Image (cartoon, rainbow, N blue to C red):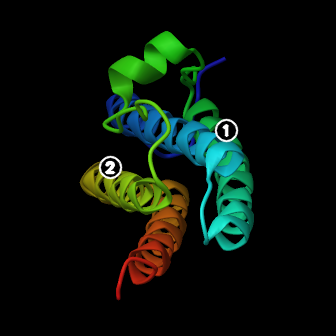
């Protein structure tokens, strides 16, 4: 059955493509955050262990929202490591970094998600896709705040 939600097919495809990159970034950041949660050590262990848990839990919920928006636009959401590695702008962690390096990598990851989300806005606005614009606004707000909080932990 054809989709008639007031957004042209080509616009839906462009938005879904951008959201696929956002999904890949979000999922990659989820994996990295969860990995750091398991492996953090040092004097900030308890604080970071709990903080990373809250962050990966939120990211796990976010991937579902992003994937469902892609589906609502009439496209299939990517869902494999191979697809995510091609689409994501976030690099996987190598080895087990020190706690401060974990924080730095997560700041970079949060900021990467913000840039990806922000890059989708022109297509969403052009198509008057308020639902995607709202999702992007929520994601940007959360990731900017999380990056700020992580960055604050690195100050002397």
Is 69 placed above or below 126 here?
above
Quarter of the rendering containing residue 104: bottom left
Per the image, the residue denoted by label 1 is 68
> Which residue occupies 46% across, 79% down?
153
- Judge by depth and name the residue closer to the eye, 156 or 125: 156
Q: Is residue 34 left or right of residue 136?
A: right
Q: Is residue 30 left or right of residue 46?
A: left
> Which residue occupies 39% across, 55% down?
101
The image quadrant where one finds the N terminus is top right
Q: Can the viewer see residue 46?
A: yes
Q: Secondary structure at mark 2?
A: helix
Q: Is residue 75 left or right of residue 86?
A: right
Residue 116, disc = 2
Residue 79, disc = none
> Which residue occupies 51% across, 44% down?
29
Q: Position of residue 96 (x, y in %)?
A: 50, 38
Q: Position of residue 19 (x, y in %)?
A: 44, 39
Image mark count:
2
Mark sitting earlier along the chain (2/1): 1
Q: Position of residue 41 (x, y in %)?
A: 62, 55
Mark 1 Cα shell of 10 Å, populated few (<14), some (14-19), many (≥20):
some
Q: Can the viewer see residue 8?
A: no
Distance of label 2 from label 1 (alpha carbons): 18 Å
Quarter of the rendering containing residue 78: top right
Is 27 placed above or below 138 here?
above
- Judge by depth and name the residue closer to the eye, 42 or 147: 42
Q: Position of residue 45 (x, y in %)?
A: 67, 65
- Judge by depth and name the residue closer to the eye, 43 or 82: 43
């Amino acid at each position: 059955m054809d989709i008639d939600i007031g957004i042209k097919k080509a616009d839906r495809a462009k938005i879904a493509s951008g959201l696929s990159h956002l999904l890949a970034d979000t999922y990659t950041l989820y994996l990295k955050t969860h990995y750091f949660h398991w492996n953090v050590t040092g004097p900030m262990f308890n604080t970071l262990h709990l903080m990373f848990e809250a962050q990966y839990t939120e990211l796990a919920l976010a991937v579902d929202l992003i994937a469902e928006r892609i589906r609502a636009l009439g496209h299939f959401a990517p869902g494999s490591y191979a697809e995510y590695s091609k689409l994501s702008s976030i690099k996987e962690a190598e080895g087990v970094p020190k706690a401060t390096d974990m924080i730095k990598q997560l700041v970079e990851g949060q900021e990467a998600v913000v840039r990806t989300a922000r890059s989708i806005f022109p297509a969403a606005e052009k198509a008057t896709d308020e639902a995607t614009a709202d999702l992007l606004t929520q994601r940007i707000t959360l990731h900017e705040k999380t990056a700020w909080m992580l960055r604050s932990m690195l100050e002397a």
